Amino acid sequence: MRYKHLSNSALFSKVIFAAACVAMAAPISSALAVSGVSTTVEQKPTDLLSQQLLLADNDDDDDDREVDLPESVKTSILDDISQRANVEVSALRIVKAEKITWPNSCLGLKGSGICSQPLVPGWQVVVAGERQMWVYRTDGSGVLAKLDEESTQIVNRTMTKVQSVTRQTSSRTTVQQRTMTVQRSTQISAANSVAVQSQKAGFTLAILQPAGEISEVITRVSVKSKHGNKYHKERFLGDYKYKIKSKAKFVKGLKAGDRVVVRLYDTQNRFLGYSEFECLSANTMVNLILSANPRKYKVVRTVYGLDANSDGMIDAGNTTYDYFTQVSGERVSFLSTSREVQVSQFQVQGLSAVAANSVYPTSFKQGEFTLVRQSINVSSANLAAALKATPGSLVSITDVSDDDSSTYDVGQLMMDYREVGVASGIQVNFDDVPANHWAKEFIAELAALEIIEGFPDGTFRPDEQLTRAQFAAMVNQAFNKVKVRSAVSFKDVSTAFWAYTAIREAYQMGFLDVAGSEFKPNDSLSRLEVLLGFAEGLNYNVSGSPEAILAAYTDAAMIRSDVRSAIAALTQRGIVVNYPDVQTLNTNKVATRAEVCALLYKALVSTGQVVDISSQYAVEGQNVEVQQTDDDDDDDAKFRERRHCNQGIGNGAEGCDPGNSQPHGGSNDEGGRTPGNK
């Protein structure tokens, strides 16, 4: 290969392009594969690495990357970046543009509301500024232009690493050596980007007041967990006394897309302000900035961004979200600009200057749960008891340490505050599930997660057998996975059946198999059938010797040869729970509601959606790293608002919407009969 001499600026330009290409390749190909649609791509992602290797042999003008890009698309993107980042359009340049047919009107981006129009021809464009890069998705004309936040983060992390390697390269190194170093570094950077993405979401929260004299505040923290394209009800995480400028970390039990709510009070319990922010893919650094006199001027500036190395600072080169909320009476408004804000009170050394236009995450700006320019209630009758109570009256206030060492386990906080921390109307304690019941914690936490419910008489009936329809309802409520097979019309499941939608979707996700054209919804399930449902639905395979793993069971010889690998895979991931004897799998036993709750919760743990609950009946798993994916389907009908049927799970009786009823466990058949009352 010929290596031409390049100036430092020219070489750096090539490095920018290489970093962008490598970082974009994986997200693009992954998104297209998941969409399951035919795409038209003028330059395939798989070609990008080859392109990178040829960069050193191509010193043509970079402007050829903009060939055929419509002026309207270019203008739409550059104007949006200019407003977001407060930079001049003249300081931006397009370094990569390629035609792509997107799978829907959301341009293949998740959390973008209802997606119509199956195929949208458009563009993917990479723009570079002096210190930052952005990745955009647009339609063909630029009328629809959306920031691809995930790819933008990857590009900037990769770019930072490439810059570091370039600076370390000796000026005496030949151009050939330098180019090879950049190539290797870029490949490593892309791999490191994936590693960062797999980190657990969490956040570091700091409270600041640059222009006032308040020394301490009470910070009330809660979370609205993302589930599909909706959110669970707000859940209390505690009241914390912060000294101004202090920081505390909240780890585990969170995922990207969860919304964290913060209410601020002074030490006399007077309400000072409100904010919400969205958890990012790794640790999120959040700064809440109070006005000079928050008792009268109840405005809070929220500044946050990715802090992948958890050093307490927003990483350079990533999107920084920056916006204001203002409280008036019992309502809070999310402001779109800072024009009417007394910005001088919110300038903090080390943070960016206040921009004219607010920068919000996409989900705050569009879709069903948009907040920008909205006014919402800061309190309501449906909130958890702890969120309605005066700070310190129901739950003790926790002091945050002065040295920024305080770290809190969110998953544990959820369980600690469960009885007072879940929304009004969510039942977590049941009359027939006493505190010493072996599955108490599994049942209570699944109820708190809004996956299961009890019966109208206040019971859960943990020892009742579970039917195939009920199992379909539970997994359909718990998991959001890509459909792996087409829907089937079962002869014995009418559209009027209470679990019709749940059965249809659970089958499409791969959780239940059938023989022939009948589903047999009212048949009971054996423990083996439940276990196989999880193994198939989650697509788990064993790593290592199945026989060695199955040696944990005294009845291993009774496990059929054709399912041994599947059971071993579940055992390896810590999903198996055996009551009353942890060493006896008992595959032929009919599964009870309590047993399925325990297995379901452990399956959720294995996917990283919830924190683990220890149990003496849980078979200890091995450390198998499972890639966590977000397979939300924004068009999924199961997330439409549904009217609950009665009798604990829904029964298709008059007054219900049988096609869309939301079952939560129970034991009712199509005629509305409850066990024991046939």
Image (spheres, grey):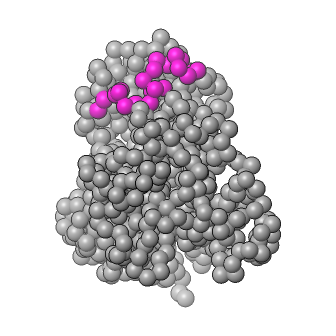
- The answer to if 627 sits in the magenta stretch is no
Above-or-below relation of 522 to 645:
below
Main SS, magenta region, reads loop
Question: Residue drawn 26% across and 32% down?
Answer: 375
Front-most of 666 and 140? 666
Question: In the rendered image, is residue 3 in sight?
Answer: yes
- Residue 676 x %, y %: 48, 50
> Which quadrant would residue 47 be assigned to in this image?
bottom left
Q: Is residue 552 left or right of residue 415?
A: right
Question: Residue drawn 30% across and 40% down?
Answer: 371
Front-most of 27 and 570? 570
Question: In the rendered image, is residue 608 in sight?
Answer: no
Above-or-below relation of 652 to 104:
above
- Residue 398 x %, y %: 60, 24
Question: Residue drawn 60% across and 63% down?
Answer: 590
Quadrant position of the N terminus in the picture: bottom right
Quadrant position of the C terminus in the picture: bottom left
- The answer to if 392 sits in the magenta stretch is yes
Q: Is residue 531 left or right of residue 84?
A: right
- Residue 419 x %, y %: 53, 32
Q: Is residue 496 left or right of residue 8?
A: left
> How many numbered badges does the structure rendering display?
0
Front-most of 31 and 642? 642
- Residue 440 x %, y %: 62, 42
Toward the top, the furthest residue is: 268
Question: Residue drawn 34% across and 48% down?
Answer: 645
Query: Magenta residues?
Result: 376-397
Toward the bottom, the furthest residue is: 1
Above-or-below relation of 319 to 33:
above
